[in-house]
Image (spheres, rainbow, N blue to C red):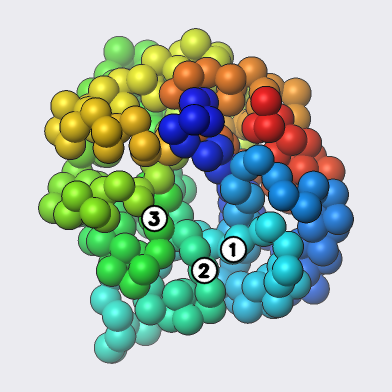
């Protein structure tokens, strides 16, 4: 990371885990485990049903909260969906969009991801736009082409002001929940390519200011080495964010 240009961001994606009570307990424990003013921005993304309780439990701490998904229409006959204005109403600062689990299990396309990112920005929040290749794509040498096409599609049509706010998360699918992490060099290569695309399309000032997180089996033992890479500006953490000590250790690894 380059802290002169980009404040590191460490986000915990709790996925489909934890009741309201368990979520508030985790936030309270995390608030205790963190320094009062961590170097990194710290964000947790609980399930929708725990968002307001997490907001209350995090009040007065350095912990911001995020949603894991969103629908792009603001309101209407869309049974079961949750919109960006409703998430903003709950005080969310960030929304994860285009996670590979959404793309793979729920059929989200690049177009859906772009609409979601625009809706999040339109409601005054920041999208964390996920991208990443499958093992087959990596083995076929298609990693960069695939990831860059996902990023390009997600950002197409955004204004310069909106683009400057977006956070990108590179999460190789084969590294998610598997204990298998991309090596710092391999991750850096993809992060560098993403920043290169941003620079080419939108200019170097925008590219230099955009935070690109790494996700995929980030743990206390590998976080510092990953975030020490010049183009890795933080982490999107799944499993290790479900426990306060391990997540706090990853936040601490971003201090350096
Ligand atoms: P793990 O850290 O459990 O591999 O999950 C990563 C992830 O998908 C975060 O969004």
Q: Mark 3 points at which residue?
A: 127
Q: Name the residue under label 1.
A: 65
Image spot of residue 230 (x, y percent): 48, 19
Compare residues 120 and 134 and report the one nearer the observer: 120
Asked whether residue 67 is in view, the answer is: no
Which class describes the residues within 10 Å of circle 3: few (<14), some (14-19), or many (20+)? Answer: many
Which class describes the residues within 10 Å of circle 2: few (<14), some (14-19), or many (20+)? Answer: many
Asked whether residue 99 is in view, the answer is: yes
Q: Mark 2 points at which residue?
A: 92
Which secondary structure lies at badge 2?
loop
Cα–Cα gap, marks 3 and 1: 12 Å
What residue appears at the point 25 percent right and 61 percent down from the top-left corner?
A: 118
The reply to whether callout 3 and callout 2 are in contact (CB within 8 Å) is no
Cα–Cα gap, marks 3 and 2: 11 Å
Compare residues 150 and 138 and report the one nearer the observer: 150
Mark 3 or mark 2: which comes first in sequence? Answer: 2
Which class describes the residues within 10 Å of circle 1: few (<14), some (14-19), or many (20+)? Answer: many
Mark 3 or mark 1: which comes first in sequence? Answer: 1
What residue appears at the point 51 percent right and 26 percent down from the top-left corner?
A: 1
Q: In this view, does 150 lie to the left or right of 202?
A: right
Q: In the figure, 125 relative to 234: above or below?
A: below
Mark 1 or mark 2: which comes first in sequence? Answer: 1
Query: Does ligand 1 reach within 8 Å of label 3's beta carbon?
Result: no
The reply to whether callout 1 and callout 2 are in contact (CB within 8 Å) is yes
Which secondary structure lies at badge 3?
strand
């Amino acid at each position: 990371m380059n802290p002169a240009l980009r404040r590191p961001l460490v986000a915990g994606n709790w996925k489909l885990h934890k009741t309201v009570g368990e979520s508030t307990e985790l936030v309270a424990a995390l608030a205790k485990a963190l320094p009062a003013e961590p170097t990194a921005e710290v964000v947790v993304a609980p399930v929708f049903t725990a968002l307001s309780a997490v907001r209350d439990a995090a009040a007065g701490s350095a912990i911001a909260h995020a949603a894991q998904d969103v629908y792009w229409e603001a309101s209407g006959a869309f049974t079961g969906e949750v919109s960006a204005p409703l998430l903003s109403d709950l005080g969310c600062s960030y929304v994860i969009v285009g996670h590979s689990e959404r793309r793979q299990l729920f059929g989200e396309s690049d177009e859906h991801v772009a609409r979601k990112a625009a809706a999040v920005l339109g409601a005054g929040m920041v999208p964390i736009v996920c991208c990443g290749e499958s093992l087959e794509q990596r083995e076929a040498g298609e990693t960069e082409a695939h990831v860059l096409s996902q990023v390009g599609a997600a950002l197409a049509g955004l204004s310069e002001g909106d683009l400057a706010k977006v956070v990108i998360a590179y999460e190789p699918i084969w590294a998610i929940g598997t204990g298998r992490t991309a090596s710092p060099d391999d991750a850096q290569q993809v992060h560098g390519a993403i920043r290169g695309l941003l620079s080419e399309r939108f200019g170097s000032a925008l590219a230099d200011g955009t935070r690109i997180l790494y996700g995929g089996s980030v743990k206390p033992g590998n976080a510092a080495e990953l975030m020490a890479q010049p183009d890795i500006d933080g982490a999107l953490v799944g499993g290790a964010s479900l426990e306060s000590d391990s997540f706090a250790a990853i936040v601490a690894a971003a201090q350096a």
